[in-house]
Image (cartoon, rainbow, N blue to C red):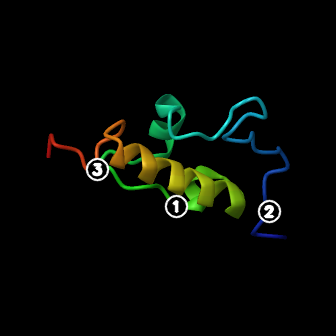
């Protein structure tokens, strides 16, 4: 009778334990940026708040150093 039954399978973490959050790791940072160039929310990323803060600062540093674009120029 419970309408709101959640799935019992555990979600896989979006960052593996061997991956280091760093502004130079652009392949990792691109997974957390939308097509428009916005940083995705914590719920969509499935990150902890500490991880989300470090991802956000790393993306901002990478943008300033021109490793990542500020916005998508195709639109």
Q: Which of marks 1 and 2 is in front?
A: 1
Total count of labels? 3
Looking at marks 3 and 1 on the same chain, the residue that comes earlier in the sequence is marked by: 1
Q: Residue at x 47, y 33 (%)?
A: 26
Query: For mark 2, what is the residue?
Result: 5
Q: Nearer the viewer, mark 2 or mark 3?
A: 3
**Secondary structure found at label 3:** loop
Residue 19 to residue 52: above or below: above
Q: Which residue is drawn at 70% across and 60% down?
A: 50
Residue 20 to residue 38: above or below: above
Residue 40, position as x, y percentages in the image: 47, 55
Q: Are marks 1 and 2 in contact (CB under 8 Å)?
A: no
**Secondary structure found at label 2:** loop
Disc 1 and disc 2: Cα gap in Å? 25 Å
Q: Residue at x 73, y 42 (%)?
A: 13
Label 1 crowd bin: few (<14), some (14–19), many (20+), radius 10 Å: some
Disc 3 and disc 1: Cα gap in Å? 17 Å
**Secondary structure found at label 1:** loop
Tell me where residue 9 sits by quadrant: top right
- Residue 41 disc label: 1
Tell me where residue 48 sits by quadrant: bottom right
| Foreground residue among 23 and 6 | 23
Decide if residue 29 is on the left or right side of residue 9. left
Query: For mark 3, what is the residue?
Result: 70
Q: Which of marks 3 and 1 is in front?
A: 3
Residue projecting furthest to the front: 65
Label 3 crowd bin: few (<14), some (14–19), many (20+), radius 10 Å: some
Looking at marks 2 and 3 on the same chain, the residue that comes earlier in the sequence is marked by: 2
Q: Residue at x 76, y 44 (%)?
A: 11
Looking at marks 1 and 2 on the same chain, the residue that comes earlier in the sequence is marked by: 2
Label 2 crowd bin: few (<14), some (14–19), many (20+), radius 10 Å: few
Residue 47, position as x, y percentages in the image: 67, 53
């Amino acid at each position: 009778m419970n309408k709101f039954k959640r799935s019992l399978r555990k979600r896989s973490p979006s960052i593996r334990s061997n991956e280091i959050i760093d502004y130079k790791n652009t392949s990792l940072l691109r997974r957390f940026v939308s097509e428009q160039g916005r940083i995705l929310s914590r719920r969509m990323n499935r990150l902890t708040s500490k991880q989300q803060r470090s991802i956000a600062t790393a993306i901002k540093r990478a943008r300033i150093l021109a490793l990542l674009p500020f916005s998508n120029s195709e639109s």
